[in-house]
Amino acid sequence: MSRCPLCGEVLKWEDLIEQMLTLNNFKELLKNRDSFLSTLDTFIFTCPKCGEEFYGNSLSQNEASKVFELLNEFKGSIDYENNKVKLKLTNLLTLDLMLEEWDRRVKNTR
Ligand SMILES: [Zn+2]
């Protein structure tokens, strides 16, 4: 779960990605994981709660990488005309992390 480094508010990935949609080359970024992640690292996000700005490198790299996969997996998850992310990224991410944890537990008990 990613939080604002300044006020601790839980951040929704769909909101964060929507802020990144202002980049003209966002579609291109989705084609390459490295450029997506390095752009996210230096992108200045604004917290919807406290309004402070922070760099993307304070967000979880692991989550960012999964967000990249999710956006690529679900084509049409972004409405470029209205700059909207239609996918509930945060919910999917939580589910994904839960399954991973479950998988780890199952393997450990064998
Ligand atoms: Zn904040």
Image (cartoon, grey):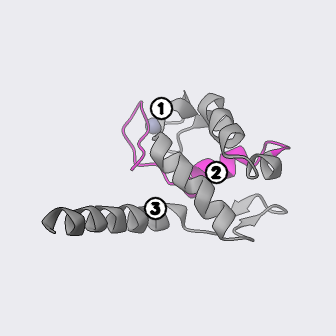
Q: Residue 108: x, y in percent?
A: 18, 62
Which of 86 and 100 lies nearest the eye of the viewer?
100
Q: Are marks 1 and 3 in contact (CB under 8 Å)?
A: no
Q: Which element carries disc 3, helix, strand or loop?
A: helix
Q: Is residue 35 left or right of residue 1?
A: right
Instruction: Identify residue type, mark 2.
Output: Ile
* Residue range (magenta): 1-25
View quadrant of ligand 1: top left
Q: Earlier in the sequence, mark 1 or mark 2?
A: 2
Q: Which residue is mark 1?
A: 58
**Residue 59 visible here:** yes
Residue labelled with disc 3: 93
Q: Quadrant of the C terminus?
A: bottom left
The local crowd at label 3, few if under 14, some if 14 to 19, many if 20 or more residues have their Cα within 10 Å, is some
As drawn, is 24 to the left or to the right of 44? right
Above or below 6: residue 84:
below
The reply to whether the C-beta atoms of the residues labelled 1 and 2 are less than 8 Å apart is: no
The numbered dot on residue 10 is: none
Pointer 2 residue: 17
